[in-house]
């Protein structure tokens, strides 16, 4: 897994920038979809790397999640 991604996510978590993490996750999802649609090459290692990065980003978003009941669910999601 990319240490760079871990540092990026840690920085966003530190400054509590949920929007940046959400945008980063959306970008990674787009890249993953493009890789999965690619024909003629074997993108397995790239797909695995993107999936690992997405797991790091999702973990960062979980760290920013407010305690249950402190914010209505529809305002968080």
Image: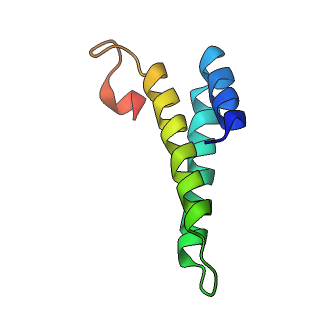
Could you tell me residue 70's position as x and y percent? 33, 12
Quadrant for the N terminus in the image: top right
**Rendered image quadrant of residue 53:** top right
The answer to which of 61 and 46 lies nearer the viewer is 46
Q: Is residue 77 above or below residue 34?
A: above
Q: Tell whether 45 sits left or right of 59.
A: right
Residue at the farthest left position: 69
Residue toward you, 44 or 66 = 44
Q: Position of residue 24 (x, y in %)?
A: 63, 43
The residue at the far bottom in this view is 40
Question: In the image, is 14 to the left or to the right of 64?
Answer: right
Q: Residue at x 53, y 36 (%)?
A: 56
Write the residue at 34% across / 32% down: 74
Q: Position of residue 18 (x, y in %)?
A: 57, 28
| In the image, residue 61 above or below residue 28 | above
Could you tell me which quadrant the C terminus lies in?
top left
């Amino acid at each position: 897994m990319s240490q760079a991604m871990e540092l990026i996510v840690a920085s966003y978590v530190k400054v509590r920038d949920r929007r940046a993490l959400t945008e980063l996750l959306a970008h990674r999802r787009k890249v993953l979809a493009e890789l999965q649609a690619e024909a003629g090459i074997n993108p397995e290692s790239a797909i695995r790397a993107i999936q690992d990065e997405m797991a790091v980003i999702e973990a960062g978003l979980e760290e920013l999640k407010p305690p249950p009941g402190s914010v209505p669910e529809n305002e968080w999601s």
